Image (tube, rainbow, N blue to C red):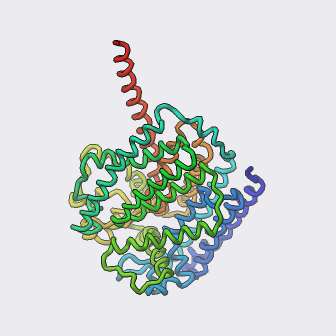
Amino acid sequence: MLNKRRLTILLFINIIIISTITVEYLYFMINRDFILKFIEAQLIGIFFYSVLSTYSLVKNWLDIYIMFLALIFLFLLTRPFMHLFDLVEMINYNEHDWFRIRDNFMFSNFTMNKVNFILIYMLLFLNIGYLIGLKKYFRPFSLKNLKLQYTKYLNPQMGYIFFIIGLFAFLIKVFLYIKLLNNFGYFYLYSGNYTLPIFVRVFDDFFYIGYVIIMINIPNKEKAYIISLIFILLYSTMLFTGMRGEFFTLVFTVIYLLSFLYQWRVKLWQIISVGMSLMILAQFTIVIKFSNVSFENIDLFDMINLFLYSQGVSILILGYFIEFSDYFVNIYSGFRYLISTFISTGYTLFGQYGNRYEMSPETIYSVSDKLQYFTSPDGYYNGAGTGSSFIAEIYGLGGDIFFVAIGSFLLTYLIAYISRKMIYQKYGFFIFLIILPILFWIARAGYIYPIKKYFFALILLFGFIFIYNLVFSKIRKVEGRK
């Protein structure tokens, strides 16, 4: 059972820390300066406090919020962490290179300090959102209630059909990506200057959807492990395209799903061992992604450092938003950042979204495209992209801590709701698993993207129900004539 007294104490501690940080932040805004490593130490300390305090409450290292925080650390906090402990210098980067996109540009000391303050507020309000959500929606795990969600519309046979069809589409996509990669280079994959076959575009997602349908029917443990292993091994072919993020997000999703369904209880050293192994595997894919990288003179420690440094690039997006706030930050642009995923989808559906050469600065809505165009127009047209980040999008609404606090709170309150309550509602477990990968990826994705995935899941459900009823009504009519 949840220790509500401890939860209340943790909420109180978070509020005290916020009050202390606010005093420091006001001093910083007045004096426009602060000791960078001091605020970095507080940032990393608050991260570890967040993880350990959550574990003290849920007693599970694979709790959804702890896994979420691990990816927040990977994508947003690794460079401050490396700078704090001088790990950046060990891989031949100087003190300021942890905040670098271009070789000839360095952020101001004010920007670097403010980024750390914003990330601290983000962590603290993420904590508060999850704790309040947990207090309201917590219920003990119930396999029986999950099994009650079984319906004729989401049966295992349908899952296997989708899994196989999607597998063929997925492997064709990987083959075509590798071919494009070899012929035109990595960034060409993001240029929009090619079109995948319609079979691939329509059925590619079926691979994961089929896996989800199989798993929500809760197969026995042995079958679940075999299906999950097959899914991960086949999906690992994506590493050969250089797209590591999509693969490792799904690895996290599968680990969480199995740990949730079969109530794994793992030790911290086991998690660290698996994490280190995944980092080393991920870094080896750099050889494929960038042919000029060699590991001949790099030891395992250097490989892990390089992986952390490269994955921590998402912090730069927030840095640019602060350094060039006049260009990136206002309520109108911020709103467009938030809804950019729906705008691009609408353009695509109505055939109005062309390749990058047909886009202008006025028609670029997403954070990723706008920032890439700002830093390098030629790189933008050649297919490069900076990626996005939820923290930059919510900061971009007005450049204020208020937006960071509200946005962070709502995000983890949503995570608590869908992982503790919605999963036990009809079709809720299916919807949750469709949304989960993007929640794990949100440090590099748009803030509203989970809502888009929610609507996608609803469309899938309506489609399943419609097709099922249509097919079986035809069968009943044929049988009636007999």
In the image, what residue occupies the spot 50% across and 43% down? 431
Q: Nearer the viewer, residue 59 or 277?
A: 277
Identify the residue shown where x is 25% and y is 60%: 356
Residue 432 visible at all? yes
Task: Tell me which corner region of the image, top left, top right, bottom left or bottom right, holds residue 94.
Answer: bottom left
Q: Nearer the viewer, residue 244 or 121?
A: 244
340 on left or right of 69: left
230 and 14: which is toward the camera: 230
Q: Name the image quarter holding residue 129.
A: bottom right
Residue 374: percent from left, percent from top: 32, 69
Give residue 92's position: percent from left, percent from top. Answer: 44, 87
Q: Residue furthest top?
A: 481
Asked if one can make out residue 438 in the rendered structure from this viewpoint, the answer is: no
- Please count the marks in the image: 0
Does residue 264 sit above or below 182 in this rendering? above
Image quarter of the C terminus:
top left
Name the residue furthest right: 5
Q: Which residue is at the far front?
A: 222
Q: Quadrant of residue 320?
A: bottom left
Please state the horizontal and vertical placement of residue 14, each as a whole percent of the image. 68, 63
- Report x, y in % for residue 252: 51, 59
Establish if 442 lies above or below 164.
below
Image point (53%, 58%), residue name = 403
Q: Nearer the viewer, residue 252 or 348?
A: 252
